[in-house]
Amino acid sequence: MSLTNPAPAVTLTIAGSEATGGAGAQADLRTFQELGVYGIAALTCIVSFDPKDSWNHRFVPVEPQVIADQLEAIQTCYPLETVKIGMLGTPATIDTVATALKSQQWRNIVLDPVLICKGQEPGAALDTDQALKAQILQLATVVTPNHFEAESLSGMSISSIEDLQEAAKRIHQISGAIVVAKGGIRLEGQNAVDVYFDGTTLELLSAPKVGEVAVSGAGCTLAAAITAELAKGATALEAARTAKAFVTEAIRNRVSSAAPFDAVWQGGASGTSA
Ligand code: PXL
C-alpha cells in the first residue's frame, strides 16, 4: 500500500461520554476529526441526562482499573505527545489519570478543568475539585477554565473583562500553565470574550455573541480544537485563535436538541451542513 498523506498526529482525549453527544468525548473526537488529527479516547465516566428529572445528569464513573487498562492499551500502541483532559469526575479517577500522565513525557497537556456536573453529590464534587487542583492542574501545559471554573481556580469573582484578565494571571501563577479563560456569554456586552495569557502575552479572543443562551459542547470543542492545533505544531497563541474561530462557527451551526441546550456542530467551520 502506498502512503499518500503524511501520518496524522495521534491525539488522545481522556474524557467522559455524554450520551447525547453534545459534550465530552464525542465532541472532542468530532473536533479532532475536523481538524485533521487521529483522535482516540479513554472514557472516564458515562453521563446520561434524565428527561424525567429536569434533564439532571446521571453520572456513572468507569472503574479505575478499566480507565488504567484503556490508558495502558493506548500508551503502548502510540508514542503520544498531546493529550486533552476533560471530565474526570471522581478522586479515584483523578489518581488513575495522574499516574498515567506521569508515566511518560508530554509536549502538550490541555486541561479543561470540568469542576462540577449537575447530578453529582455536592460533597463528592468538592473532593473531586480539590483532587483536580492538587494532582492534575500542575501537570497541565494549557488550562481552559470557563467563567465558573476561573472564579473557583483564581479565588476571585469575575464580572468584567478586566476581572477575567486578572483571574487568568492568577491561574497562570498557581499552575504555570498557559491560560485560556472563557468569558463566553457570561460577561455583559455584544462579544463573547475569552482571555489568553501565557505569562508574557495577554490577548483578548473576541467574537460577536451568537444569542445569549449557552450551547452544549462549546467548552469541550474549544479545548479540543486547541489540543488538535497544538498536536499539529501550532504555537499556543495560534492554537487559541484558531480554536476560537472554530468554536464560533460550531456554535453558529448548532444542532437543535430537546434538552435545555442545543449542541454545537463541529462541521460548521468547514461548511458541512448540519
Ligand atoms: O461540558 C462539560 C461536560 C464534559 N464532559 C461530559 C459532560 C459535560 C457536561 O454535560 O457530560 C461527559
Image (tube, rainbow, N blue to C red):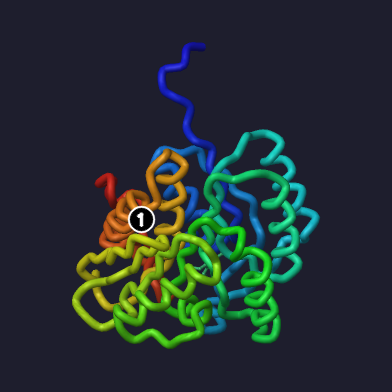
Mark 1 residue element: helix
Q: Which image quadrant is residue 76 in?
A: top right
On the rendered structure, is 212 left or right of 171? left
Please state the horizontal and vertical placement of residue 264, each as a whole percent of the image.
Answer: 37, 61
Picture layout, residue 150 above or below residue 33: below
Seen as rendered, the residue at the extreme front is: 200
Please state the horizontal and vertical placement of residue 231, each as a whole percent of the image.
Answer: 47, 42
Q: 230 or 41: nearer the eye?
A: 230
Name the amino acid type tagged 1: Ala
Q: Residue at coordinates 35% horizontally, 82% vertically from top-left?
A: 163
Q: Residue at coordinates 38% horizontally, 43% vertically from top-left?
A: 234
On the rendered structure, is 255 left or right of 219? left
Q: Which image quadrant is residue 133 in?
A: bottom right
On the rendered structure, is 84 left or right of 239? right
Q: 242 or 164: nearer the eye?
A: 164
Q: 111 or 164: nearer the eye?
A: 164
Seen as rendered, the residue at the extreme right is: 65
Please state the horizontal and vertical placement of residue 58, each as a whole percent of the image.
Answer: 62, 74
Q: Residues within 10 Å of mark 1 (few under 14, many from 20)?
A: many
| Residue hosting label 1 | 240
Is the residue indicated by label 1 positioned so its CB lies within 8 Å of ligand 1? no
Give the tally of numbered discs: 1
Q: Residue at coordinates 53% horizontally, 60% vertically from top-left?
A: 111
Q: Residue at coordinates 44% horizontally, 64% vertically from top-left?
A: 179
Seen as rendered, the residue at the extreme top is: 1
Please state the horizontal and vertical placement of residue 115, each as a whole percent of the image.
Answer: 57, 74
